[in-house]
Amino acid sequence: MELLDNLALGFSTALLVQNVLYCFVGVLLGTAVGVLPGIGPTATVAMLLPITFSFEPVTALIMLAGIYYGAQYGGSTTAILINLPGESSAAVTALDGHEMARQGRAGPALAAAAVGSFIAGTVATVALAVAAPPLASVALRFGPAEYFSLVLFGLIVSIALARGSALKALAMIALGVLLGTVGQDIYTGTPRFVFDQRELYGGINFVSVAVGMFGVAEILRNLENERTRTAIVSTVKNLWPTREDRRRIVGPILRGTGLGAALGILPGGGHVLASFTSYAVEKRISKRQQEFGRGAIEGVAGPESANNAAAQTSFIPLLTLGLPAHPVMALMVGAFIVHGITPGPNVITDEPALFWGLIASMWIGNVLLVLLNLPLVGIWVRMLRIPYQVLFPMIILFAAIGTYSLSFNAYDVYAIAFFGILGYILIKCGCEPAPLLLGFVLGPLLEEHLRRALIISRGDASVFLTRPISAVFLALAVAALVVAVLPTIRKRREIVFAEDESLDGIPNPVPPPSPRAHDDLDELPPRVPPQR
């Protein structure tokens, strides 16, 4: 009964005219972002974050959440129609989705993606509503030692799930934590790493870091890889799947939803991992393994369901523990803080309308996605004809104006340029900026809980091992670090993310599968670097 009352409060909040309007704007922008390769939800949320600061907190968060799961959905459209995944987690959808389009079955492929996304989003939203209150109650019993160990565990797991070298991911987290300590000491007020610059005494602006690292840097990288994009599917007909198609997608949708809901809460690339895991599972258990890579509808329904379920459940650690599962959730943490709300277990009691309104808006957003995307397929494909040389300067200008308007300080714009260049250099060196942002957001929390626990224990560091929950999280963190560096696990990570490497913001079409391509996802050879 209490759950029903809370959901009633959430829908009464989410169905307010302004909240529905901005939810619609969010999923519309998110879909457009998912369609256009190279921008991505992280860059878009980062660049649109400044304009939401004048909104009511619940309205701002509903819009930002809509951008995120709208992008997760929108990436499948161009993956199916023109073999060009707009978002990294949609890469696996292109394997069979585009083959269906080449066979004249783009309609059923799009419908399978839409139905799977809607069902997965609905189930994951219910799971979020059911699981969040008990987890928040448990989190209220955590002390500083438990929170320190939990944050450390989250950072280590994000290393294990990051692409590329685990050592580089660790270095990026360390750099992010270091940047997060710039400013005055939280207890003594002593300036740290400010270099006599007055603007740094309050710390580095979160928005400048996010926009520079994920906006400007990604745009610079994409401008050097501009290619011509052409659509090969002009008309989409017969959207409704046949009875045989409907029978074949039921199992993959249910299994993909379960996998995505479970993997979405993991720090790092949980949504990407969910998509590839779902594809591998469907191929292994299918009686039609020879069809995978040649137009199996299961290869569309399963990964798309997993992708969207993971997008919804990634809000669980954010809303219950105040910990971001990936960079988009880190940006959501920034949105919470800017609006004067501390993300974590207290949100459910201190801001019940915001908490339940955000959850209810996710279901409304999923309905809007289904109603919006299929009729507008032609528009999404036409958007790909916009030259990046025209699109990207306008995006940068918009982001700079939005960031400057926060405090009317030109220093913030210079910071965008600095972090944009730094992010570009890091990308060219093979370092992912995502762990850096997680370290930047979680670093101050790590320091605060570490020092608070040591103050309470009078400097006795054994408090982290004598408290059972803290000791368990530390043991899990050590295990995750060991697993991340094991040769067999490292090879598996390279295989899983190999398909995604060419999609890191580069509008580079995925080649059609060869007759023997992807016979088994586990047998994909590691990518060979090009000769220089």
Image (cartoon, rainbow, N blue to C red):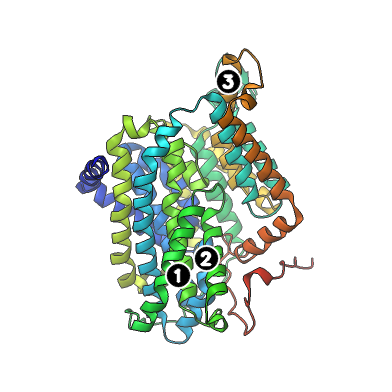
Left or right: 214, with 35 as reference point: right
Q: What percent of the width, then of the height, locates residue 488?
A: 73, 58
Q: Residue 315, relative to residue 322: is it above or below?
A: below
Dot placed on the residue nearer the N-terminal end, 1 or 2: 1
Instruction: Assess disc 1: are there few (<14), some (14-19) or many (≥20) residues with their C-alpha within 10 Å of its C-alpha.
Output: many
Mark 2: secondary structure: helix
Residue found 52% across the figure and 81% down from its top: 287
Relative height, residue 489 to residue 452 (above, below): below
Q: Nearer the viewer, residue 15 or 84?
A: 15
- In the picture, residue 320 is in which quadrant? top left
Mark 3 touches mark 1? (CB < 8 Å): no
**Residue holding disc 2:** 278
Question: Mark 1 is on which residue type?
Answer: Pro
Rendered image quadrant of residue 491: bottom right
Q: Residues within 10 Å of mark 2 (few under 14, many from 20)?
A: many
Q: Which mark is on residue 252? A: 1
Residue 215's place in the image compared with 179, above or below, is below
From the viewer's perspective, is residue 102 above or below residue 161?
below
Q: Which residue is mark 3?
A: 453
Q: Locate the C terminus by quadrant.
A: bottom right
Q: Give whichever of 27, 412 is nearer the camera.
A: 27
Indicate the secondary structure of the residue bearing disc 1: helix
